[in-house]
């Protein structure tokens, strides 16, 4: 059979989405100061802004929610949640948080002091900001291949081990309270990290007495890539691979809004009970008591079921093929797609698609805005609006490594014809690409500016 993929589920509930006209969208975008984060969701036809919390839950998850135990302390729902984390990830201790950034915040507040350093293959924006707010320094050490959108390699999310060792040696382990690794590497086009690299990163951190935490948001997709791309893993089950990945770590932070296929939730899991109690002090002040951490009992039930559904092999096979199909559709439309496509998203290289726009005039924002204008498709820039930084010595603005536009795919939400529609919109954008200008910022906050920045189109 030559069908590109088939959904391993059928649709039981539907949600209407509204189409607007091109003229209406031009007005909506202008009123949103040319920042798609400011556009109301009802004015978006297909929303690829994020795969986070935008998932369709299953009938089993919804029915588990009806059994949520809303007790303040020691709820049954917490027990179910803890059981799922223990079984799937192998960590004995878990603290729920309202979402991933809550987990990062609590972990860093407990372990990291001002002036210290935390390495990662690449920190996501909230991870970076959670460290910056403490006066600490996030350090990105991904392999150089991660920044090359045209290289077709299996594990471009890997940590650069040589750079990491040099960094630890120069910075000194006592200034590094913990080291991280993000699987898959969202800020590097959703590229996976190999088992070999997870193991070697762990050995390196541990050799220098540094705690090792995994940013686990998309752990199931990472495991799927290991199964399909790494020698020696083809015949291993996803469950075994997941357990092995986490066996190398002292703990993890998790946004359940991704691979646990829910709409809200997160957690910190770890091996050390003393560390759990230390984090718990902060958790109780900022998130909630240790058995709910800012979530309702029903949310914990949904995560417990979702963790199992997120590692189902038929689901993961569909998930990879679905994402790959969107990459092919965009390529056929003439967009420069980052190679290979990631697990949760397709990344288009805006620098190649709009070569006439310089990085600090935000080609990614221009491209994302045009996708919205042409077809009501919302994506997100992952480029210099999100990640440029000031050179400490000169104060000069340094662009991000890449100017990408991310099409993040909500789990179990869009069908193949939705993806074909995106292809038609992309074709229209490519046709008009040379007449699109860059943008300039008219207002932006100090941290995480991309969320709220206001921009205007340049005249030429
Ligand atoms: N770590 C990574 C790798 C992420 O991608 C995210 C969120 C977080 C941590 C924070 O989790 O949103 O639950 O607080 N990424 C979303 C995205 C927002 O669109 O990629 P959160």
Image: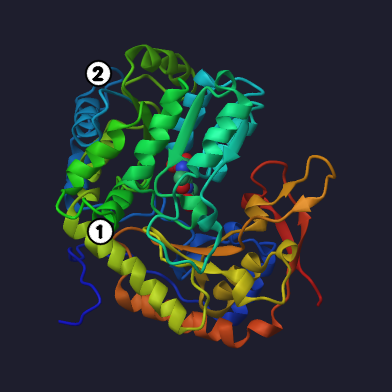
Residue beneath the point at 44% across and 48% down: 158
- SS at mark 2? loop
The residue identified by callout 2 is: 74
Residue contact at pointers 1 and 2, CB within 8 angstroms = no
Q: Residues within 10 Å of mark 2 (few under 14, many from 20)?
A: some
Q: Position of residue 371 (x, y in %)?
A: 55, 74
Q: Quadrant of residue 274?
A: top left
Real-space CA distance between mark 1 and mark 2, rounded to the nearest whole angstrom: 40 Å
Q: Residue at x 41, y 72 (%)?
A: 327
Placement of 210 over or under 303, stated as above or below? above
Q: Position of residue 242 (x, y in %)?
A: 25, 42
Q: Which residue is mark 1?
A: 228
Q: Is residue 369 visible?
A: no
Q: Secondary structure at mark 1?
A: helix
- Lower position in the chain sequence, tag 1 or tag 2: 2
Expressed as whole percent of the image width and height from the top left, the position of residue 331 reads 45, 79
């Amino acid at each position: 059979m030559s069908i590109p993929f088939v959904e391993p589920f059928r649709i039981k509930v539907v949600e209407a989405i509204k189409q607007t006209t091109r003229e209406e969208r031009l007005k909506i975008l202008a009123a949103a100061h040319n920042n798609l984060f400011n556009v109301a969701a009802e004015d978006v036809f297909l929303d690829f802004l994020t795969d986070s919390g935008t998932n369709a839950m299953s009938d089993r998850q919804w029915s588990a929610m009806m059994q949520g135990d809303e007790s303040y302390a020691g709820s049954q729902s917490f027990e179910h949640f803890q059981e799922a984390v223990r079984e799937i990830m192998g960590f004995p201790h878990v603290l729920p948080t309202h979402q991933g950034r809550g987990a990062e915040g609590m972990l860093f507040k407990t372990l990291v002091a001002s002036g210290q350093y935390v390495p990662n293959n690449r920190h996501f924006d909230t991870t970076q900001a959670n460290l910056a707010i403490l006066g600490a320094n996030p350090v990105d050490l991904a392999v150089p291949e991660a920044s090359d959108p045209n290289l077709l390699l299996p594990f471009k999310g890997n940590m650069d081990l040589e750079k990491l060792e040099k960094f630890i040696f120069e910075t000194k382990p006592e200034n590094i309270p913990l080291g991280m690794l993000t699987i898959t590497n969202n800020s590097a086009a959703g590229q996976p990290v190999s088992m070999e690299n997870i193991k070697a990163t762990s050995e390196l951190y541990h050799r220098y007495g540094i705690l090792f935490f995994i940013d686990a948001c998309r752990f199931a997709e990472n495991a799927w890539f290991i199964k399909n791309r790494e020698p020696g893993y083809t015949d291993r089950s996803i469950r075994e691979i997941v357990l092995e990945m986490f066996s190398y770590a002292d703990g993890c932070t998790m946004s359940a809004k991704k691979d646990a296929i829910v709409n809200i939730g997160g957690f910190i899991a770890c091996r050390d009970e003393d560390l759990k109690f230390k984090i718990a002090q902060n958790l109780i002040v900022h998130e909630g008591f240790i058995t709910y951490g800012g979530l309702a009992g029903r949310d914990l039930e949904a995560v417990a079921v979702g963790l199992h559904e997120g590692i189902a092999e038929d689901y993961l096979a569909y998930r990879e093929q679905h994402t790959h199909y969107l990459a092919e559709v965009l390529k056929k439309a003439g967009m420069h797609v980052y190679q290979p496509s990631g697990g949760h998203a397709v990344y288009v290289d805006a620098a190649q698609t709009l070569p006439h726009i310089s990085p600090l005039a935000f080609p990614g924002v221009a491209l994302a805005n045009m996708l919205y204008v042409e077809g009501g498709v919302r994506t997100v820039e992952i480029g210099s609006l999100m990640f440029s930084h000031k050179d400490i010595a000169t104060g000069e603005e340094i662009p991000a490594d890449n100017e990408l536009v991310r099409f993040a795919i909500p789990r179990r939400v869009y069908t193949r014809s939705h993806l074909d529609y995106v292809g038609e919109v992309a074709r229209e954008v490519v046709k008009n690409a040379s007449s699109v200008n860059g943008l300039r910022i008219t207002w932006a906050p100090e941290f995480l500016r991309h969320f709220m920045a206001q921009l205007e189109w340049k005249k030429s």
